[in-house]
Image (spheres, grey):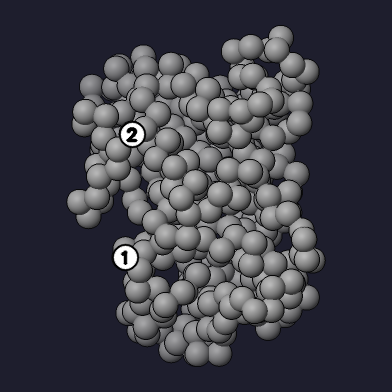
Amino acid sequence: MGPGSNESSLLTVIITTSPTPSIPSTQLVSSVLRSFNRHCTALLAARVIVVFDTFEHVTVRSRLKKGQATAKVAENYSDYIENVKELIIAKYAPHGDKNPASEPGATALREWQDRAEFGLENPRNEVTVAITQTADQQVTFIEPAARLGFGLAVRSALRICGTPYVWVQQHDWALAADIPLAPLLDVMASSDADEAAPVKYVSFPSERMRSYAVSACVNDYPALRELTASLKRDFTPPSQPEVKVPLTPLFFWFDKPHLASTEHYLARVFPSRLAMRRGEFIEDKIGQRARHNMKEGQWHRWACWLYYADEAKVPYLRHLHGRTWDGVDGKLYLKYGCVEDE
C-alpha cells in the first residue's frame, strides 16, 4: 500500500449478528460502532457487510450458541433486524441510500440470492441467503433462510466483499484501545512476498491474552517458543517508515475481532464445502486445527499474528457477553465493571 492510499478502500468490515436476550435493542451493535468511532474511525468509512444469522428452534430456555431461542427472542428478531439496518445505514451511508430492505424504491439497489453449501453434495445441505446491497456497494445485508452459524456466515460475506482485506467483527466485542489500521494494512500488503514472516491474519489482545508471548500456551511448547523468539518483531510500514508495528506470532485462529487477507481466509479456512458444517464456529474447529499444525512447525501456513504494543499489557478488545446480557435501564454493562451509556 503506497503513500496516500486510503485504507478504507482496501477493507470490508464484516459484522455478524444473531438473536440475543437484549433484542430488539441495538445496544450491543451500537456499542461496537461507538468503539470504532473512538478507536479506529476508518472502520466506519469502509464498506460494511452485516450478516443476520438466525435461530434454529424455539425453546423454553435459550441456548443461543446452539441456535435455540425463546419465543420472546424469536418474536423480537425481525424488529431487531430492521433496527440494525437503520443503525448501519445511519452510520455508513448517512447521506446516501436509504434502508435497502425497507425502502427498495428509494435508490437503485441490487438484490440477489446466493446459497451457503456445506457437507456432502446434497440439496438438503445448502441454505438460501438473500443479499441486498446499496448502489455504491457501501452497505450490504445478508439474511439466510435458516441458521448458518458463525463460520458459514463469515464465508457468505467473504465471497462477496470485493476487497483484499476484511475486518471480521462479532457483535459483542468492542474495541478498548486505538487500532493503527493503516500501518497494519501496509505491513500486510508489503509482506506478501516475505516467505519468512508473512502477515495474513492479525488479532488483538483481550484480557486473557495479556503478555501472550510469554504465557503458558506459548512457553510450554518448545516449537512455539522458538517461533516466537525468531519471528516476534517490530514491522515497518513502507509508506510510514517512522511508524513501528509490533507483532508476535499467534498460535490460534480466533473468532474475536481480527484483520485478515480475504484470499488467505477463503483458502485456509474454507478450502471446500466440507470445511465447515452448519452451526459451527471457526475457532472451535479450524482454530484447533491451526494450532495443531503450528505445533508441528507449520505456522507459516496460517501466518497468524497478535498485535503486541507494550507487550500486550493492556487489552485492546473488550467482551460484551451478548448471549447473557439482557439490558439494564439503557446502559450496557461491560466486563470488569465498566459501564457505557447509550
Q: Residue at x 69, y 35 (%)?
A: 138
Look at the picture and state if 139 lies above or below 212.
Answer: above
CB under 8 Å between callouts 1 and 2?
Answer: no
Q: Position of residue 269 (x, y in %)?
A: 61, 55
For residue 18, above or below residue 181: above
Coordinates of residue 30 in the picture (x, y in percent): 42, 35
Q: Nearer the viewer, mark 1 or mark 2?
A: 2
Which residue is depicted at the point 55% across and 33% down?
A: 91
The picture places residue 306, in percent across and down from the top left corner, at: 49, 70
Residue in the picture at 61% in, 19% down: 99
- How many marks the image carries: the answer is 2
How packed mark 2 is, by other alpha carbons closer than 10 Å (few <14, some 14-19, many 20 or more), is few
| Horizontal relation, residue 58 to residue 121: left or right | left
Q: Position of residue 79 (x, y in %)?
A: 43, 16
Left or right: where does residue 108 sit relative to residue 46? right
Task: Please indicate, yes or no, whether residue 314 appears anywhere in the rendered image.
Answer: yes
Q: Which mark is residue 208?
A: 1
Drawn side of residue 122 relative to residue 288, left or right: right
Q: Secondary structure at mark 1?
A: helix
Hey, what amino acid is under mark 2?
Glu
Label 2: state its secondary structure. Answer: loop
Alpha-carbon neighbours of circle 1 within 10 Å: few (<14), some, or many (≥20)?
few
Quarter of the figure with residue 222: bottom left
Give residue 205's quadrant in the image.
bottom left
Residue linked to disc 2: 342
**Residue 116 or residue 324, whichever sits in front:** 324
In-front residue for pair 173/88? 88
Q: Quadrant of the N terminus?
A: bottom right
* Residue displayed at 61% across by 28% down: 94
